[in-house]
Amino acid sequence: MKYCVKCGKQIPDSAKFCTYCGAEQNGSTAQNVTINNYGTNNGSKEVIGSSNPVNMVQAFKLFWGRYADFGGTSSRSEYWYWILWQTIVTIIALVFVLPTVSSENGGSAFSGIITILTIAIIIWYVASIIPTFAITARRLRDMGSSTTAIILLLIGECIPFLNFFIEIAVFIMTLMPSVKQN
């Protein structure tokens, strides 16, 4: 299979035009098409689905840009920068919201701001459930797990009592290096 020189989608080897974007193909193959992690041809030497390291801002953009994309792979840096983003939001919630919610003084001058911040954090966590499962699945695929194992792990995370042990297994697996692509 080869990839479109414009959009990076996989197309049949015999295609003269991309079936997705209509771009003319000049005999390019995956080996000489350069596609970045955002799916555009920018002249870099990255290929979609590869395990190229990203910075924290790129990881944030990739996380939300690939919201429900369970296919492909995610590098360790992409996964762990997302975990760092989640940790930062959790710390903000713990430092600013939790003490005021649990205080005995219900008539705080900042109660309106705290309510808005609490709602924003709840929205953040609810909105990030599916993409967190997706990035975890991509990371596990990047380190060589089969699709069946990924599905079982993600379903197991939702089972009470069992989820603790599965989280430890997923944690260890996400630390593993990427499997080399042939």
Image: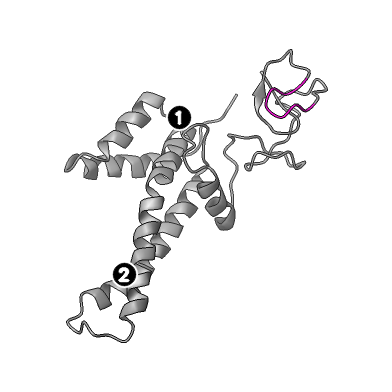
Residue 165 vs residue 2, the one in the foreground: 2
Question: Which quadrant holds residue 55?
Answer: bottom right
Which of the image's four quarters has the N terminus?
Answer: top right
Residue 37 vs residue 51, the one in the foreground: 37
Label located before the other in sequence (1 or 2): 2
Question: Which quadrant holds residue 86?
Answer: bottom left
Measured along the vertical axis of the image, is residue 151 above or below residue 74? above
Q: Which residues are magenta?
A: 17-23
**Would you call the spot at circle 1 few (<14 residues within 10 Å), some (14-19), or many (20 or more)?**
some
Would you say 95 lies left or right of 69 here? left
Would you say 120 lies left or right of 2 here? left
Q: Secondary structure at mark 1?
A: loop
Disc on res. 134: none
Marks 1 and 2 close (CB-CB < 8 Å):
no
| Residue 129 within the segment the image draws in magenta | no
Name, please, the residue furthest toward the right: 26
Q: Secondary structure at mark 2?
A: helix
| Of labels 1 and 2, the one closer to you | 2
Locate residue 71, reporting x and y percent: 50, 31
Locate residue 100, reporting x and y percent: 26, 78
Q: Amino acid at mark 2?
A: Leu
- For label 1, the residue is 144
Q: Is residue 175 visible?
A: no
Q: Amino acid at mark 1?
A: Gly
Name, please, the residue furthest toward the top: 14
Locate residue 119, reporting x and y percent: 35, 65
Would you say 109 lies left or right of 145 here? left
Residue positioned 70% across, 40% down in the render: 40
- For label 2, the residue is 94
